[in-house]
């Protein structure tokens, strides 16, 4: 499976916004956006030109892709699915991306970043509805349960996670049993419940050309 392997902090600098790709590091003084907010690469001597409408649309699309760790082909497939659904395409796309299993694992506080959550899923540590799954892009449904594989609860990572989980904020559309670390999809997310620094209408306009 193809994936982005270069320094992810460059993606934040290129987007001009913190995309929270490195977990707790993004809140520390080591954050690249705080230290070097300019785009990566050689800086032009002259004043940077204003982005065109097309450039703004592309930037918003890339921000969404980088945030959720989705490659272009898969992102385009999600957009097509959102377009076929009833309602507002941009909001449908946002909800679909939030329903990805790796994102839900991240939202439940089992990982500090989506990349870390994706690794947990791919390595078989996560159980969905009682069955082990290693597909990060699997879409959860209302009523689904997400928990740890029994053997994974004996890992050092899990032991360090247990005392820190209470300090993490769980979104309203998810619920979590703090003692057993069993998450549940209480309802499908709505756009108002999702914190996303992306102009979704710009993404719709980008693909509508």
Image (cartoon, rainbow, N blue to C red):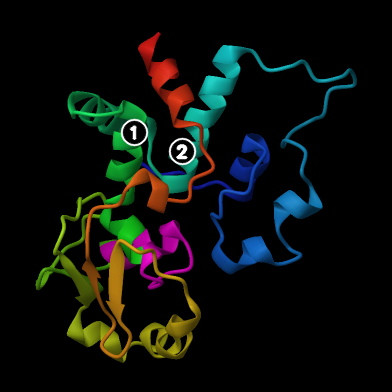
Specify whether 86 is left or right of 41: left
What residue is rendered at 49% in x and 47% in y?
Answer: 5
Q: Which residue is mark 1?
A: 75
Residue located at (43% from left, 16% from top): 205
Judged from this view, the residue extending furthest toward the front is: 192
For residue 1, say whether it is visible: no
| Residue 188, position as x, y percentages in the image | 23, 53
Q: Residue 38 sits in which quadrant?
A: top right
Q: Which mark is residue 43?
A: none
Is the residue marked by circle 2 packed among few (<14), some (14-19), or many (20+) residues within 10 Å?
many
Which of the pair 6/142 is nearer the observer? 142
- Please, is residue 50 above or below residue 84 in the view? above
Question: 75 above or below 104?
Answer: above
Span shown in magenta? 106-121
Q: Position of residue 52 (x, y in %)?
A: 64, 13
Residue at 30% x, 61% y is 173
Examine the structure image and report whether residue 119 is included in the region drawn in magenta.
Answer: yes
Q: Residue furthest right?
A: 45
Label 2 element class: helix
Precedes in sequence: disc 2 or disc 1: 2
Quarter residue 204 falls in: top left
Q: Residue at x 70, y 67 (%)?
A: 28
Q: Position of residue 65 (x, y in %)?
A: 44, 38
Q: Does 58 appear above or below 185?
A: above
């Amino acid at each position: 499976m193809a994936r982005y392997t270069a320094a992810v902090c460059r993606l934040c600098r290129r987007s001009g916004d913190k995309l929270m790709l490195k977990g707790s590091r993004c809140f520390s003084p080591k954050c690249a956006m705080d230290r070097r907010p300019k785009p990566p690469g050689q800086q032009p001597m002259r004043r940077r030109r204003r982005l065109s409408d097309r450039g703004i649309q592309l930037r918003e699309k890339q921000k969404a892709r980088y945030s959720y760790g989705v490659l272009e082909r898969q992102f385009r497939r999600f957009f097509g699915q959102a377009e076929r659904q009833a309602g507002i395409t941009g909001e449908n796309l946002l909800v679909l991306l939030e329903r990805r299993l790796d994102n839900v694992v991240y939202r439940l506080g089992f990982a500090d970043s989506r990349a870390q959550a994706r690794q947990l899923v791919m390595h078989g540590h996560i159980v969905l509805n009682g069955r082990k799954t290693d597909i990060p892009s699997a879409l959860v449904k209302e009523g689904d349960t997400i928990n740890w594989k029994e053997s994974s609860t004996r890992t050092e990572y899990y032991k360090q996670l247990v005392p820190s989980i209470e300090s993490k904020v769980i979104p309203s559309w998810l619920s979590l049993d703090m003692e057993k670390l069993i998450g549940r999809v209480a309802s499908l997310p709505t756009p108002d419940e999702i914190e996303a620094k992306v102009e979704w209408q710009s993404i719709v306009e980008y693909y509508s050309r």
